[in-house]
């Protein structure tokens, strides 16, 4: 079952990497909860498909270019830990952005039901009960 979860998460993030937000959202449970990193300036929990659309749209709106690439996937049972690499260029500043973080994605019944953001894969692995 958990390898199937990895494939579900890979498919979802492949859509996001291509800029296909609706393809990404199709892999999410309608009641998804997406938790910002704890060290975010104003951490928020985004709920449901509209919440995720608002999250992604809010990020993309600040950048002239933006790309999210999922680089590694770790099977953790009902969770899949994904290493993420964001790159972009600020819309008004032109400043390049190169950020890495990790997400712990919980999967149930073929859909991603929860995403929690972490500063590193090590933090995400620890949060789901695995040590890096």
Image: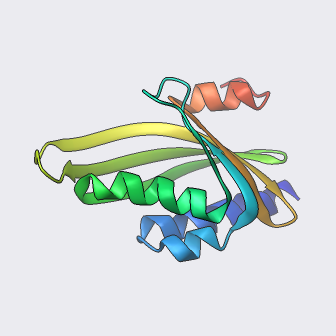
Residue at image position (56%, 25%) is 38
Q: Nearer the viewer, residue 101 or 2?
A: 101
* Residue shown at 10% from the left, 48% from the top: 94
* Residue 49 position in % (x across, y down): 63, 64
> In this picture, is 97 found above or below 31?
above
Side of 84 where 126 appears, left or right = right
In percent of width and height, residue 116 lies at: 64, 39
The residue at 46%/28% (across/down) is 40
Q: Is 97 left or right of 12, judged from the image as shown?
A: left
Q: Is residue 50 above or below residue 40?
A: below
Locate residue 77 relative to residue 105 in the image: left or right. right
Quarter containing the C terminus: top right
Q: How many marks?
A: 0
Which residue does the image show at 57% across and 58% down from the upper left? 52
User: x%, y% of residue 24?
Assistant: 57, 69
Tell me which corner region of the image, top left, top right, bottom left or bottom right, holds residue 126. Answer: top right
Where's the N terminus, which quadrant?
bottom right
Q: How is the image coloured?
A: rainbow
Left or right, residue 92 beside residue 11:
left
Above or below residue 37? Residue 24 is: below
Spot occupied by residue 31 in the image (x, y as percentages of width and height): 76, 59
For residue 9, which quarter of the picture? bottom right
Q: Is residue 111 above or below residue 40?
A: below
Rendered image quadrant of residue 98: top left
């Amino acid at each position: 079952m958990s390898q199937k979860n990895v494939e579900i998460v890979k498919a979802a993030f492949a859509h996001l990497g291509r800029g296909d937000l609706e393809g990404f959202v199709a892999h999410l449970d309608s009641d998804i909860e997406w938790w910002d990193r704890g060290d975010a300036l104003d951490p928020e929990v985004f709920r449901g498909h509209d919440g995720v659309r608002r999250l992604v749209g809010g990020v993309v709106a600040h950048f002239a270019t933006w790309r999210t690439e999922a680089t590694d996937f770790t099977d953790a049972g009902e969770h899949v830990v994904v290493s993420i690499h964001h790159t972009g260029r600020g819309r008004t500043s032109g400043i390049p952005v190169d950020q890495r973080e990790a997400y712990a994605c919980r999967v149930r019944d073929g859909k991603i039901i929860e995403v929690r953001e972490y500063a590193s894969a090590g933090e995400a692995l620890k949060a789901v009960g695995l040590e890096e």
